[in-house]
Amino acid sequence: MSGIPNTKTLLKVTGLKVSYGGIQAVKGVDFEVREGELVSLIGSNGAGKTTTMKAITGTLGLNAGDIEYMGHSIKGKGAWDLVKEGLVMVPEGRGVFTRMTITENLQMGAYIRDDKDGIAADIERCSICSRACVSARTNWLAPCRVVNSRCWPWDVH
């Protein structure tokens, strides 16, 4: 991967191996993400995309390899530690809290923040920038899959 010149590496995965019991789901993945890049993991069902993401975000242990985030190894850190550093996995569709409202789901995403006014402003910005959120505002129990990274500033620093 050539990357964007003169940018820092945000995420570097080297020799990642992950198993479920005796089944090796990820068999030596290497990649890096540099500032300003958009990187996708593609593959068929069962190829290890979600397993790779779970290992990176600390929700699944790895058998071998290393993961560097912002220049330091995060191998062995749990999701509870990584969320404070701004590294999280946002689940797709059925992974959100389906019995909670859109607003409650957004508030859960900000649980480590302590700036109430800033959180309220970000939630309002979400409802403005996403037509799906705007149409769901009258139905607070609308499916939460309409809330996504396009409308939420995930910066926790």
Image (cartoon, rainbow, N blue to C red):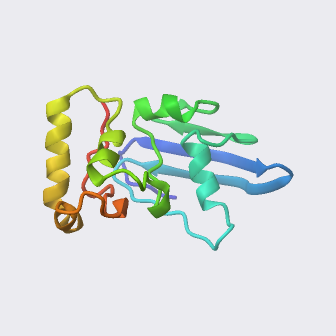
Q: Position of residue 118 (x, y in %)?
A: 16, 35
| Residue 117 falls left or right of residue 16 | left
| Residue 100 falls left or right of residue 125 | right
Instruction: Name the foreground residue: 134 vs 60.
Output: 134
Q: Is residue 142 above or below residue 69?
A: below
**Residue 71 appears in the rendering:** no
Q: Residue at x 69, y 47 (%)?
A: 15
Q: Position of residue 58 (x, y in %)?
A: 58, 38
Q: Position of residue 36 (x, y in %)?
A: 33, 52
Q: Residue at x 13, y 42 (%)?
A: 121
**Residue 126 appears in the rendering:** yes
Q: Quadrant of residue 120 in the image? A: top left
Which residue is at the far bottom? Answer: 44
Q: Residue at x 20, y 54 (%)?
A: 126
Which residue is at the far top? Answer: 114
Which residue is at the far right? Answer: 22
Quadrant of the rendering where the C terminus is positioned? top left
Q: Position of residue 94 (x, y in %)?
A: 49, 61
Q: Quadrant of residue 9 in the image? A: top left
How many marks on residues?
0
Q: Is residue 81 above or below residue 64?
A: above
